[in-house]
Amino acid sequence: MRAGITKHITFHCARYTNAILFLNNGVDIFTVSKMIRHKDLKTTSIYAKVMNETKIEVVKK
């Protein structure tokens, strides 16, 4: 509240953002999976897909 953020941010949103930031900064997907406590690497691969789509959009620009 002191920062002036009025948007409701869920735990899931924070976790997702954290995973994307890790991947964006070169942390391998296996480590990210363990850090955010996914039981299956397949679940974490969704975040990697988002990163790939982001990279494609950047290249297109």
Image (cartoon, rainbow, N blue to C red):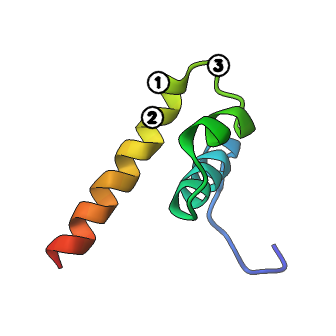
Residue 50 vertical placement versus 40 (above, below): below
Could you tell which of marks 2 and 3 lies nearer the N-terminus? 3
Does the residue at mark 1 contact the one at mark 2 (Cβ under 8 Å)? Answer: yes
- Seen in the picture, residue 11 relative to 51 is either above or below; the reply is above
Query: Which residue is drawn at the image coordinates 66% and 40% (left, top)?
Result: 31
Crowdedness near tag 3: few (<14), some (14–19) or many (≥20) residues, C-alpha within 10 Å: few
Amino acid type of the residue that numbered disc 1 sits on in the rendered structure: Lys
Name which residue lies at 60% across and 35% down. Answer: 30
Residue 8 location, x and y as percent?
A: 65, 56
Going by the numbered disc 3, the residue's amino acid type is Lys
> Distance from label 3 to label 1 (Cα)?
9 Å
Residue with the mark numbered 2: 45
Structural distance between the alpha carbons of marks 1 and 2: 5 Å
Q: CA distance from mark 2 to mark 3?
A: 12 Å
Residue placed farthest to the top in the image? 39
Q: Is 24 displayed left or right of 38 in the figure?
A: left
Disc 1 is placed on an element classified as helix
Q: Toward the viewer: 37 or 5?
A: 37
Q: Quadrant of residue 53?
A: bottom left
Which quadrant, please, contains the N terminus? bottom right
Q: Are marks 2 and 3 in contact (CB under 8 Å)?
A: no
Q: Quadrant of residue 56?
A: bottom left
Amino acid under label 2?
Answer: Ser
Instruction: Decide which of 26, 57 is in the foreground and name it.
Output: 26
Question: Which residue is labeled 3 in the image?
Answer: 39
Q: Which mark is residue 26?
A: none
The residue wearing badge 1 is 42
